[in-house]
Image: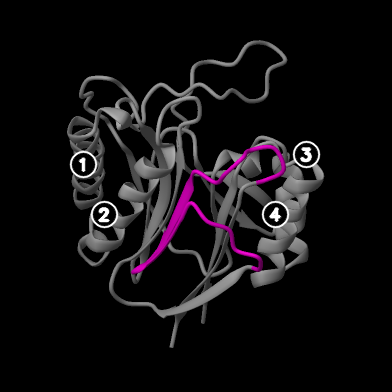
Amino acid sequence: MRYITVTALSHPGLIRGHNEDSLVVGPWTLCGTVTENPQTLVFPLGQPLVVAVADGIGGQPAGDVASALTVRHLATLGPSLDSEDAVRDALTLCNRAVYAAADRDPALTAMGTTVAGTVVLPDALLVFNVGDSKVLETDGDGVRQVSVDDSPPLREGQRTTSLVTQAIGGATRFCAITPHVTTAPLAADSRYVVCTDGLTDPVLDDEIGELMRAHDGGRAAFELWKAAIEAGGPDNITLAVIGVVE
């Protein structure tokens, strides 16, 4: 029997005053809190399993509220996410829900979040994102980003940027989104990292690839978090490592 393992953690990092990241793994959500150790969940390969992170936009109100709303909607909708169109519709619903919440409470005006994740199907992987949180595929050959950053072009010598060109919410008036959604084969020899930029901004892809080749499961998630902390932990760090076991 094939099954899916998901090892996840969320941590505020070393600089931020609190955690505005949220996480969903199937029906389980973790919103704006801290996991002291990686948590591993195991699921049979069958009905759609959503695994996603949401990174509340800093410098604007209530990023933690926006990210929590987003992952809770995805948790509720997860079992129905069996196609690219279903994922697009779900993300559109998340966007409308964030704006609707802001309309009801002026203190939440312009709150927003990025989101990135996967839906694991029996024979395929749906990859999605809005904003600059990422989905990475790792195998013996290294690491490849399979999500699409919504970021402006980088200047020469610039490796990262905190700017995003679209998000879930994030504006004073409603803005529609165009989610990135693609389908990929579900490769048993690959693992996937779903993460906020608190991991990928301070830690180079090559180092992520090396750590994933050297470690499995909870140890892999811990070593990725440790690398971000040792690089200064400048932002909230939330990640999930997904594997398929034969």
- Of the numbered discs 3 and 4, the one sitting upstream in the chain is 4
Asked if residue 105 is positioned above or below residue 191 in the image, the reply reads above
Q: Mark 2 points at which residue?
A: 73
Check disc 4 and report its element: helix, strand or loop: helix
Q: Name the residue under label 4.
A: 225
Circle number at residue 97: 1
Find residue 109 and report its horizontal and vertical position in percent. Answer: 29, 26
Q: How much space separates mark 1 and mark 3, taking CA atoms?
A: 34 Å
Q: Is residue 2 left or right of residue 183?
A: right
* Amino acid type at mark 2: His
* Amino acid type at mark 3: Gly
* Amino acid type at mark 4: Trp
Query: Main SS type for the magenta part?
Result: loop
Q: Which quadrant does the N terminus fall into?
A: bottom left
Asked if residue 121 is positioned above or below residue 56 in the image, the reply reads below
Q: Is residue 112 in view?
A: yes
Q: Do the residues labelled 4 and 1 touch (CB within 8 Å)?
A: no
Q: Do the residues labelled 2 and 3 touch (CB within 8 Å)?
A: no
